[in-house]
Amino acid sequence: QRPERPGDFIINALKLNEQQQKEFLLLGRRHRVRLDSVQDNIKRVQNEMFRLVSTGELDSTKTSELIKQIQEGEAAKHMITIAHFEEIRQILKPDQVPLFKQFMQELGNRIIAPNHPPLRRGGPPPPRR
């Protein structure tokens, strides 16, 4: 049995058919290339900031400029990811859209509170660690 790929969870959750899986994997590769490009730029800017700190050349103006570039890169990563999920939604059949909505809700909950179990309604609170 082969190890599960990151996209397998989405493929299973959305019940993608064979053609949709091919399209999804293509979308995933394009998404990864776009994210890698932005992340490489963020790393370049961070390295420049650390270089300037190490040489004593970092002043408040340069710091502000570099931080702004990093913030723009982080925002771009979010926009790329949103566009990616919109592309995924476009390959779905109408009966898969409710699965997509549920998946996105669960994904949002994981991002907002990744180390916390889902909120329980009623009953005692979870044990403290």
Image (cartoon, rainbow, N blue to C red):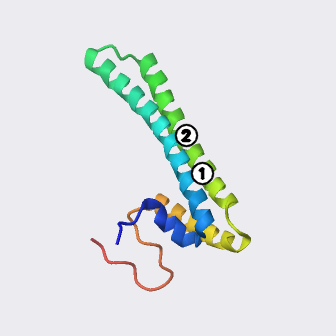
Which residue sits furthest bottom?
123
The first of marks 2 and 1 along the sequence is 2
| Secondary element type, mark 1 | helix
Rendered image quadrant of residue 45: top left
Work out whether 102 lies above or below 123.
Answer: above
Whole-percent x, y for residue 25 in the image: 54, 56
Q: Secondary structure at mark 2?
A: helix
Residue occupying the point 65% across, 54% down: 87
Residue drawn at point x = 43 percent, y = 33 percent: 40
Q: State how far apart marks 2 and 1 are (Cα).
A: 14 Å
Q: Is residue 83 above or below residue 106?
A: above
Estimate the x, y position of residue 54 in percent, counting from the top left.
Answer: 26, 20
What residue sits right under mark 1 in the picture? Answer: 84
Question: Which of the two marks, 2 or 1, is nearer to us in this view?
Answer: 1
Q: Residue at x 60, y 51 (%)?
A: 84
Outermost residue on the right side: it is: 94
The correct choice, above or below, for 1 with respect to 31 in the image is: below
- Which image quadrant for residue 88? bottom right
Q: Which mark is residue 75?
A: 2
Q: Quadrant of the C terminus?
A: bottom left
**What's the residue at 56%, 39% (across, down)?**
76
Circle 1 packing at 10 Å, graded few (<14), some (14-19), many (20+), is some
